[in-house]
Amino acid sequence: MIRIAMIGIGQIARQQHLPTIAAHKAFTLVAGVSPVPVVLEVPVFPTVAALRESGIGVDAVAICTPPDIRYALACEALDAGWHVLLEKPPATTRSQGVALLERAEAHDITLFSAWHSVHAPAVAWLKDHLPGLSVRDIAIVWKENAEKWHPGAEWLWAPGAPGVFDAGINALSILCALTPEGVVFRKAELGFCPGRGAPARARLALETSDRALGIIGEFDWLHPAESEIWEIVWSLHDGTTLALSEGGGHLLRNGKPVPIGDRPEYAGVYDRFAALVAQRLSDLDLRALDLVTEALAYGRRYAID
Amino acid sequence: MIRIAMIGIGQIARQQHLPTIAAHKAFTLVAGVSPVPVVLEVPVFPTVAALRESGIGVDAVAICTPPDIRYALACEALDAGWHVLLEKPPATTRSQGVALLERAEAHDITLFSAWHSVHAPAVAWLKDHLPGLSVRDIAIVWKENAEKWHPGAEWLWAPGAPGVFDAGINALSILCALTPEGVVFRKAELGFCPGRGAPARARLALETSDRALGIIGEFDWLHPAESEIWEIVWSLHDGTTLALSEGGGHLLRNGKPVPIGDRPEYAGVYDRFAALVAQRLSDLDLRALDLVTEALAYGRRYAID
């Protein structure tokens, strides 16, 4: 049994992590860390230092705070000798991620970047079936209403935030997982609302590293709440389309549903974390973060009226 | 003898690469590639394809074109089975660099990112002596006049260009080479001239991955031509300062010159390339490019009057 503490008890922790841990045979929740008072069935401490001082035995932590404070918390947790699961994105930048991996290796413990969308049932089906197919192009459409999901959240739009890629990085994590030949950034256009430091819209042009296949991504954070889209479509040379929708929960072949598994995303996340901890291995995938960073760095910026 | 062709016969090729190759015992120049007609003592072809069709025996190429076309040319050269040296920066983005490395490995040939500043004499001295010293902080000041070095060049300022980091990435390449514990991005401020898509000024806050040491970088592309500065200063806990100046050509300890070697930068670049080719090893260092990309992506942008 892996004794796990939850750092950051917000929406994603309550909706996904805590129920998944409660149901998972490899984990037992022993504590929480939250700077604001919250009630759990286990002790909750205001800081990582307070948890350490409590003397409670901890083997691992899941860090589910907002992204900008994850790096410092992960350093503390790794220095305490705890295996670390990081919600997506695993860090604000690649240089932070690399530093965390080196720290984990120095302590001989596990660092795991939990790209939850990669564990969606449709992704597993595609991982099995795509390698035998002749793909012509890939199109991502990821459009949602930021205000619906994060009402009034100013950090979403600050300089240094990933903007529309806060959601869109899920699509890119799936894309990278299903494109073993590698994905290369070509160009980007980024739409900014007046006075905001992070983009609300983005259009990406990518290609596979064998240069055989073009990939287009359209990301929108200002989409009407009633018609949101989270879709990746693989168009094959024989005219077939495979459309992953609902962020990975459904798969359509030529518009007809394909039967896929039903193990929930976060069960897969914790299966993987348990397996890594058992072997003291790390899995830090920074490819989707790289594509976002490259788009924000080198994309052409325009103003949204 | 490594038969080498030069791809891109501009200023850097003529000032550094061609004289260095002519003087180096491991290399012999056999051809050039240039889309605009130029005269060399060896045949010059308009494209890589034309060089291949010529039947001239080529073992390696040095790619010294503007950065934005290096990726496609490097793919062609690697597919021809030629070892590749890339002028800095080795690619526009990390995802391109990783794709090139995988291509080189698939062909079992050498890919080498030639960060020339890393081969400056002062860097070798510092590599030997810094590990024994107790450093308190590091400050980079890299200020030059873009118009003096690249008169009228519009590509410097286009969206997708690195702006002031076109020069400043040399400082970051030295920093990364001399900071084995790793460098982590913290924050950046980027100054943009009106109507331009790449920054003219930047201020970086970095830290070492052990979080023990702060690093500040000041970069300016609008500095007066008569007082340019390319300097990195290590301040030690005992009050000593070590100042690398002239981009690595000089070193001062507490203001007094330290005797350093005098082997020219590019001789070191080609020594290293020859050694890599002999062993069919690659050396693709993307750390300085990562820091630039992170700064451009996540830095706060402001307008320069």
Image (spheres, coloured by chain):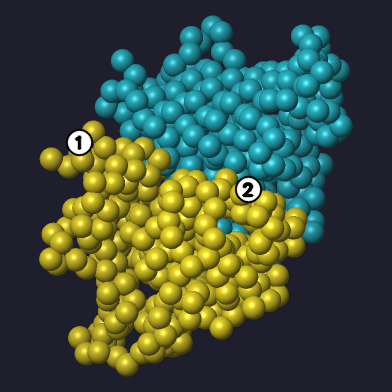
Chain colours: A cyan, B yellow
Residue A156: tell me if it is visible: no
Please state the horizontal and vertical placement of residue B13, each as a whole percent of the image: 43, 64
Name the one closer to the observer, B264 or A176. Answer: B264
* Label total for image: 2
- Judging by the rendered image, the residue that carries numbered circle 2 is B49
* Rendered residue at 48%/13% (across/down): A223
Given contact means CB atoms under 8 Å apart, are the residues at marks 1 and 2 in contact?
A: no
* Rendered residue at 74%/58% (across/down): B107
Residue B161: tell me if it is visible: yes
Determine whether the residue tagged by mark 1 lies in a helix, strand or loop.
loop
Q: Residue A24's mark?
A: none
Name the one closer to the observer, A299 or B68. Answer: B68
Name the one closer to the observer, A62 or B129. Answer: B129
Seen in the picture, residue A180 relative to B58 is either above or below; the reply is above
Q: Evaluate whether label 1 is on the same chain as label 2.
A: yes
Where is the C terminus of chain A found, in terms of image quarters?
A: top left
Identify residue type, mark 1. Answer: Pro
| Parent chain of label 1 | B
* Rendered residue at 39%/58% (across/down): B10
Q: Quadrant of residue A20?
A: top right
Q: Could you tell me how far apart the alpha carbons at marks 1 and 2 are, in whole angstroms?
A: 41 Å
Determine whether the residue tagged by mark 2 lies in a helix, strand or loop.
helix
Q: Residues within 10 Å of mark 2 (few under 14, many from 20)?
A: few
Identify residue type, mark 2. Answer: Ala
Please state the horizontal and vertical placement of residue A247, each as a whole percent of the image: 66, 23
Nearest to N terminus: mark 1 or mark 2: 2
* Rendered residue at 34%/25% (across/down): A302
- Judging by the rendered image, the residue that carries numbered circle 1 is B194
Residue B149 shown left or right of residue A80 in the figure: left
Seen in the picture, residue B249 relative to A112 is either above or below; the reply is below
| Parent chain of label 2 | B
Closer to the camera: disc 1 or disc 2?
2
